[in-house]
Image (cartoon, rainbow, N blue to C red):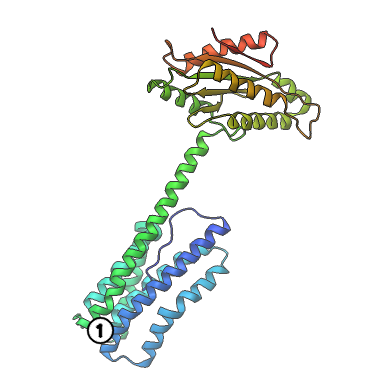
Amino acid sequence: MSVDVLPVLDLTAPDKVGRVVARSHRLRTLGLALGGIMVGAVLYRHGVPAQMWVLLALHALAWPHVAWLILRRSDDPIADDKSFFLGDAAMGGVWIALMQFNLLPAMLLVTMYAITLIAIDGSKYLIRGMALQVLACGVAAVANGLQFQPETDMPEVLAALPLLLVFPVTLGFIMHGLAQQVLGQNRQLVRLGSIDALSGLLNRRQWEDAVNVALSRRCCGSAMLLLIDIDRFKRINDQFGHTSGDEVVRLVGEIIRAGLRQGDLAGRYGGDEFGVLLCDTDPDAAETVADRIRAGVADLRIEHAPGLRCTLSIGLARGPAGIGTAREWIERADVALYRAKLAGRNRFVVAA
């Protein structure tokens, strides 16, 4: 009578596996308890012997907690729980036979187990579970003398209502929660795929795409684009090591992010280059932002490389005035950046 569900996510971290086991325990406890009420009502009408009531109590009330204890100590609780679900499905077949194929309770058990097996692992587990259920039902029916009483009376209908009403609603909430979890994970994966891990800014492709989108929406008339280059970055790597170089990139990314407003876009354009799109910004405000970033980087000190000093050259270009693509805009800023380099570095220059 198990009516629980195991998420089909690939969860292998200990805390995630623990949550799966706990969820399985709660739902197995609920499903078997509600199913036990329904089965018990049918068994009561048939006047079954005491040992059958003991079997029902062990399965409906004790087994969920025994399974939970086993899974907590298992080396592979996910696989073991799937095996338990198959065993639960087989027990469902046993109860169908012992209820003498009472129609409504039998159909409810078949349906609830089918839903559970599909939730576990799709059609593969459904076929395996249903095969075991049919086999167990046949064996139990023969052992029970092939008794057949499909009629369902009103007390049995009422006893079936909790399982019929509570389980689908509970399962719906569980599946909704899992769907939201998957959606959140997918969004996180998309975000991680868009972000440069070292600087924490957009990667080059995502940043260029974002600038192109801004251009297509014609919202860049009063925008400024900054192209930022770390001065003599190769020398930093050669003199202080690539670890220090990576730290410089990370810290520059932090300084750039700290200076952004809502709607501004920053990305790592290359190994030592960064791009920033300042929306709704006039040249004076953009120069203020550029100088703040430049000054922040000039003040950087790295603990394990006390002699390291870092400066930036920055090129600024106004948009869009004849600019059709991000590439054209970047080229204008790149010309200004080159002029900043020629003028001695550690400065910004605005494109003419």
Q: Is residue 287 in view from this perspective?
A: yes
Expressed as whole percent of the image width and height from the top left, the position of residue 158 reads: 25, 79
Q: Residues within 10 Å of mark 1 (few under 14, many from 20)?
A: some
Q: Nearer the viewer, residue 214 or 183?
A: 214
Q: Which of 265 and 282 is in front in this view?
A: 282
Query: Count of labels shown?
Result: 1
* Left or right placement of residue 72 versus residue 99 in this view: right
Q: Residue at x 45, y 18 (%)?
A: 222
What amino acid type should be assigned to the residue bearing mark 1? Leu
Element type where label 1 sits in the image: loop
Expressed as whole percent of the image width and height from the top left, the position of residue 327 reads: 48, 16
> In the image as oriented, which residue stretches furthest toward the front?
284
For the N terminus, give its image quadrant: bottom left
Residue that label 1 marks: 146
Vertically, is 222 above or below 248?
above
Q: Residue at x 27, y 87 (%)?
A: 145
Expressed as whole percent of the image width and height from the top left, the position of residue 254 reads: 63, 33
Q: Residue at x 46, y 80 (%)?
A: 62
